[in-house]
Amino acid sequence: MGAIDFGEWVAPDLKLELDGRTYTVRPPTVEAAKMILAAAVRGEVNLGLVKDEIPAEIQAMLDSIGDEHPALGDAHAAMVADKVSAATIDRVAYYAVFYWARGKEYADTLAALLWTPRKLTPSTAGGAAPKG
């Protein structure tokens, strides 16, 4: 019996395009996946998608991450070296967390909700003029 070519079923890399550059993020290792799932829990709690506290064991795992970005892998260092802004790296890391934890559709939906510029109307901006 021959070997099974599993290549077409392997999780693909995440390709991130920023300012004409493409950063490739390989699928996370088992250890990184644990951190990514913990970060996804924190993100959902912080966004109010989950009405609960972050469990102590998950918070302990998050506290151990330090300055690493497990969802971005080596792409994080490449972005820093290319002087990508901290705000952009934070958004990309947030996206990558949900991409690996919940899938592309979920990550895309959150990104659109969080970062798509919106036109404010007087009713959504709190009125046409400041109140004094």
Image (cartoon, rainbow, N blue to C red):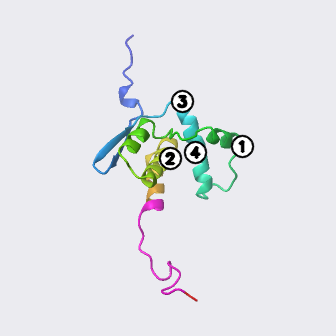
Instruction: Give the structural element (helix, strand or loop) at label 3.
Output: helix
Identify the disc placed on residue 56: 1
Circles 4 and 1: CB distance less than 8 Å? no
- Write the residue at 44% across / 34% down: 27
- Write the residue at 53% across / 81% down: 126
Left or right: residue 15 compared with residue 35: left
- Write the residue at 57% across / 38% down: 35
Q: Which residues are magenta?
A: 113-130
Residue type, label 4? Ala
Q: Quadrant of the C terminus?
A: bottom right
Q: Which residue carries the number 3 mark?
A: 30
Q: Quadrant of the N terminus?
A: top left
What is the crowding at mark 3: few (fewer than 14 residues within 10 Å), some, or many (at least 20)? few
Left or right: residue 24 compared with residue 56: left
Identify the disc placed on residue 98: 2
Residue 21, above or below 34? below
Residue 57, above or below 3? below
- Write the residue at 46% across / 45% down: 96
Instruction: Give the structural element (helix, strand or loop) at label 4.
Output: helix
Q: Residue 72 sits in which quadrant?
A: top left
The answer to whether residue 126 is magenta is: yes
Quote the CA–CA distance across marks 3 and 1.
21 Å
The answer to whether residue 29 is magenta is: no
- Disc with the residue nearer the chain's start (2 vs 4): 4
x, y (%) of residue 38? 60, 42
Identify the disc placed on residue 39: 4
